[in-house]
Amino acid sequence: MSYPVGFGHVLALHLDRRGATVFAGCLRADGPGAMKLKEAGSDRMHVIQLDVTNDEQVAECVRYVEGVTDGSGKHCAVLCLLTASKSRLKTLPFHLCHNIHKV
């Protein structure tokens, strides 16, 4: 079974190859996409179990990132979410994405 590679996957690998420390939150840290990130990424790639609808997992993710970073606050978080519901995709309109990127 092939696994579709999304924008978040490609972005995580791109940032890793550019020398960034990457925290890739995956719905299933033991899933095929997460395994591909672990295999292809460097030691700067941190694959983290993260279901954003689970407060406990979000809190654990924050603790993990804070434990790894230097506390300078000079870090960037990129959250890529795409949900499918009954074959209908919910995404942000382009103008909102553009404004977010300007920040």
Image (cartoon, helix red, strand yellow):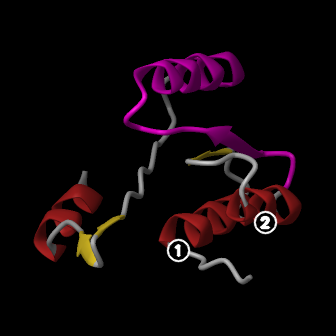
Q: Which x, y percent locates residue 44?
A: 78, 45
Front position in the image: 75 or 33: 33
For residue 84, which quarter of the picture?
Answer: bottom left
Left/right placement of residue 86 relative to residue 75 reads: left
Q: Earlier in the sequence, mark 1 or mark 2?
A: 1
- Pick the quarter of the image with the N terminus: bottom right
Residue under pointer 1: 6
Q: Residue at x 74, y 65 (%)?
A: 17
Mark 2: few/some/many CA within 10 Å (<14, 14-19, 20+)? some
Secondary structure at badge 2 equals helix
Residue under pointer 2: 36
Q: Residue at x 70, y 23 (%)?
A: 68
Q: Which x, y percent locates residue 67?
A: 67, 16
- Which contiguous range is marked in magenta? 42-71
Mark 1: few/some/many CA within 10 Å (<14, 14-19, 20+)? few
Three-letter code, disc 2: Lys
Vertical side of 1 occupied by 99: above or below: above
Asked if labels 2 and 1 touch by Cβ distance under 8 angstroms, the answer is no
In the rendered image, residue 48 lying in the magenta stretch gets the answer yes
